[in-house]
Image (spheres, rainbow, N blue to C red):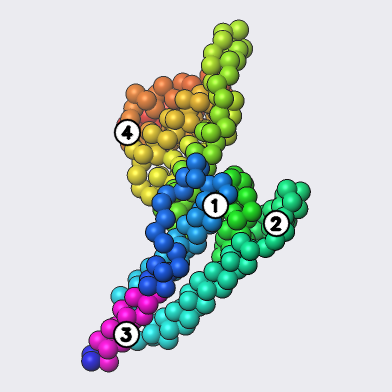
Amino acid sequence: MLLNIILIGAIVISLGVIIFIIGRKFPKLKTLDVDTVPQAQTAKVRDKILLDRMKRTTKKSKDAVRKQAVPIFNMLTGLIKKVAGKVYDLERKYQKQATEKKPLSAKESKTKVADVLAKAQAFIKKEKWNDAEKLLIEVVSLDSKNKEVYHGLFSIYLSTKEYKQALQTAQFILRLVQKESRRVEKQSEVGQKYYTVSNASELADVYMDMGEVYQRMEKPELALANYQKALEVEPNNPRNLDQAIGICIILKHKSLAFDLIKRLEDVNPENQKLKEYYDKLTNL
């Protein structure tokens, strides 16, 4: 018992060392802000992701303490060395990058970004999440507004069930996409004019991603709210209608579910799920 108490005390002190190191090297950062990303703010975006990554590593160590005190001691000792070494290595790396006399040209930067992204995607396919995340964070230093980078990070966090990180990443993607939106006039199949945004499909996809995260977090009302936002900008997407109908049935929103099923029937009358949905609606 006494040994365990001593070890737990050592672990608490060790965790304090980790937090102290990270706190010194990476000051508290605000939520990702598109307006502060360019030039000098690029490093903050990168460091925000790195800081969150290290915090998650530390949290995993804390959770392990509750399960088993003694075996964790050696692992945590190694973790301290690993995190401290990583922080100092990253600091030296960024200082070196900042003092380079000849920055990459636009063409060179674009080529390097494409190369690193390709490698990261290869790691994602192999489910080597940590390796992929490291590469994507590297790309942030080169192109902090590259949506493909954040989509990659979103995919990683969703796959590893780090839903808080996935949601934050999706929210940042949303802000990037919204900044690119332009109001446009279109014409329906029956000749009726209506207004939408230039990137409606992309915007709807981001809302659907956020809805999926909320659904996995067991927050169905927030999931539905985002699915509805997706349908506002892209009303007749069968996949999005299908997802929204499913959550409506879970929440027993019978009236809304019926309206969405009718819309799905109008745009995709051959959909195999229509009968199933009507049956479920009848039983609500």
Mark 1 burial class by Cα count in 10 Å: few <14, some 14-19, many 20+ = few
Closer to us: mark 4 or mark 2? 2
Asked whether disc 1 touches disc 3, contact meaning CB atoms under 8 Å apart, the reply is no
Which residue is painted at 38% across and 34% down in the image? Answer: 225
Alpha carbons under labels 4 and 2: distance apart? 57 Å
- Give residue 212's position: percent from left, percent from top: 46, 43
Q: Going from the N terminus, do you reach mark 4 or mark 3 first?
A: 3
Mark 4 burial class by Cα count in 10 Å: few <14, some 14-19, many 20+ = some
Q: Does residue 261 sit above or below 119 in this rendering?
A: above
Question: Residue tagged by mark 1?
Answer: 40
Judged from this view, the residue extending furthest toward the bottom is: 3
Question: Residue tagged by mark 3?
Answer: 10
- Direction from residue 118 to residue 152 in the image, left or right: left
Q: Going from the N terminus, do you reach mark 4 or mark 1 first?
A: 1
Question: Residue tagged by mark 4?
Answer: 252
Residue range corresponding to the magenta coloring: 3-18
Regarding residue 275, the answer to whether it shows in the image is: no
Question: Residue tagged by mark 2?
Answer: 103
What's the magenta bit mostly, secondary-structure-wise? helix
